[in-house]
Each structure stands twice: as C-alpha cells, then as structure tokens.
Image (spheres, grey):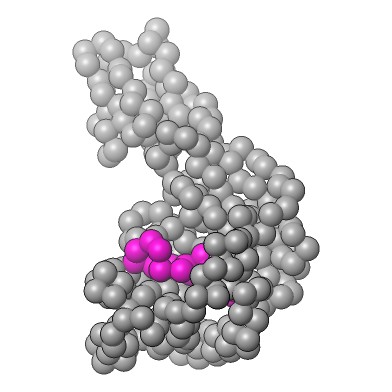
C-alpha cells in the first residue's frame, strides 16, 4: 500500500507526520522523500547513503544534417526548441526530455544524451529504508526525479507499505508524487492560510480521484474553521489532531522525531494506519 503525505502549503508538519507514520509502522515500511527540492527526512534519520545519478534525455543537434524544416520546434509543447531559418536553438532549462523532437526529425539531426538533474539516495538507519531525491543546484525539473524515487522505491524488497513525503503545494511536483497512490493524507493547520491551501489540495485530489483524509497539526492553536470545512463541506475524515506542545517543538529543533519526543502519540499513529487500510479496502470493494 502506498500512502502519500501532502499539504497545500509548506510548514504544516508534513515531514513530521511522514516520519511518525514510518516509525509507527515499524516493519515492512519504506519512506520515500519526494520533496526533492528540500529533502529533510534524512536530517532526522542520518545514515550512510548510497547515491545514484538521475538524468533526463536531452536532444543534441547535428547542424550538418539539419535541413531547417522546423518540425522539432512545432512538436515541442514546452518551447524548448526554436527553428530560425537554417539554425536550431535549444533551451535546456525548458526541455522536459520527452524525446518527441528526436523521433520526428526527418533527417536524424537530433540525437539524445542524458543530462544530469540530480540524484537519489538510499539509506537505512536501522529502522526502515529511506529513499530520497536531491535536485541539482540550478535544476528545475523536479517531476522526473520524483518519478525516479518512486520507481526505485517500488523495487525495494520486503516492503508492504510505502510512505511518500510529497512536495508542498498543488503544482506538478505534488501531482507527480501522489499519482498512483492508494491514499493521501493532507496535513494542515487551523489557520486562515492553512484552510485556504487545504481547499486547493482537496480540489486537486478530486480531479485525480484519490481518497484522502486530514491530520490537523497544532490543532489547539487556531479556530474551528478547518474542522467545519472537513466535516460539513468537503466530507473528508479527520484522522488525527496533534496538539501544539512546546516539548515537541524543542525536541524537533534538536533533530528528534515526533514519536521520539512524544512516544505517547505512537498508538494514535498506528490507529491512523489501521483506519487508512480499512478505508482503502472498502473503496476497493466498491
């Protein structure tokens, strides 16, 4: 089973919840940190990491064979290629590596070579495998790296549960991370910003037809508008409310996880996993 932990905005406690779920599951679980622009999970589970480079196919132009037909520029929906008379210009930062230009070129003037965009890292601190992606400096193509992390996670043996720590927001990186999962946990906070971005995330998941539940972090520090929205408007279950506690915040700042700081919350997170499994089973029966 694959559970994605997402949020409409950053800073709600998404990584905190993802780590807590992995610790609560204890066995047969792997944690995939798909927030490739800022992977933080390994800060709380430091261990020796095995890294692998990740790249995307980049077209290379042979000007001697190019006849200036412009077919490559016409097929590129990302405008990464511009055809100017007898010269073709390539903009690497816009290229998504789809390969369409090299396939349509009638003269074979375009070939592909891998362009590095980042790397994946696999570590195990003795508790569970942690696989993350680290986007290279200056790179902007997060989705291909996220897909690489998910593909490598699917190859891990003896894994019954995958927890995916998603990028914040509702843009392409988040959609790539949640695509194909069994359930999405939305972590929010009881503030106006939290409610606003939770609504955006809920609408995005509706478009993807993905079942979801909500965890409210720092639940006693705001008002009840998030609860009312979940129960009365979105009809999404609230699976857990985490209180705002100073001891948890202090421990987190020292690099300790939520369950290391507050082991009394472990049964609650185990119950969340049980509830998700029950809901996904009912959905599958339907």
* The N terminus - image quarter: bottom right
Residue at the limit of the structure toward the right, as seen here = 126
- The tally of labels here is 0
Counting from the top left corner in percent of width and height, residue 197 is at: 28, 68
Identity of the residue drawn at 65% across and 41% down: 52
Position of 241 with respect to 209 (left or right) is: right
Most foreground residue, 178 or 231: 231
Counting from the top left corner in percent of width and height, residue 195 is at: 27, 75
Identity of the residue drawn at 41% across and 17% down: 61
Counting from the top left corner in percent of width and height, residue 154 is at: 63, 60
- The answer to whether residue 229 is seen in the rendering is no
Q: Is residue 140 above or below residue 19?
A: above
Q: Is residue 19 magenta?
A: yes
The residue stretch that appears in magenta: 2-21
Most foreground residue, 52 or 280: 52
**Figure quadrant of residue 229:** bottom left
């Amino acid at each position: 089973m694959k559970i994605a932990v997402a949020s409409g905005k950053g800073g709600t406690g998404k990584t905190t919840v993802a780590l807590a779920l992995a610790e609560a599951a204890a066995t047969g679980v792997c944690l995939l940190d798909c927030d490739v622009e800022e992977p933080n999970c390994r800060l709380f589970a430091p261990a020796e990491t095995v890294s692998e480079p990740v790249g995307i196919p980049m077209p290379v132009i042979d000007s001697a064979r190019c006849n200036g037909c412009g077919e490559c520029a016409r097929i590129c929906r990302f405008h990464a290629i511009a055809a100017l008379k007898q010269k073709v210009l390539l903009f690497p930062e816009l290229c998504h590596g789809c390969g369409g230009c090299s396939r349509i070129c009638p003269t074979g003037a375009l070939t592909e070579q891998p362009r590095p965009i980042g790397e994946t890292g696999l570590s195990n601190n003795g508790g569970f495998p942690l696989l993350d992606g680290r986007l290279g400096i200056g790179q902007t193509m997060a989705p291909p790296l996220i897909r690489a992390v998910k593909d490598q996670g699917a190859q891990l043996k003896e894994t019954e549960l995958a927890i995916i720590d998603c990028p914040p927001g509702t843009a392409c990186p988040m959609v790539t991370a949640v695509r194909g999962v069994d359930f999405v946990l939305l972590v929010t906070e009881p503030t106006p910003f939290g409610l606003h971005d939770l609504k955006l995330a809920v609408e995005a998941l509706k478009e993807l037809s993905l079942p979801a539940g909500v965890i409210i972090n720092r639940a006693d520090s705001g008002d009840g508008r998030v609860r009312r929205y979940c129960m009365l408007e979105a009809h999404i279950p609230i699976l857990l409310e985490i209180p705002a506690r100073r001891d948890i915040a202090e421990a987190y700042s020292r690099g300790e996880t939520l369950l290391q700081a507050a082991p009394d919350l472990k049964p609650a997170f185990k119950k969340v996993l049980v509830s998700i499994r029950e809901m996904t089973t009912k959905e599958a029966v339907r």
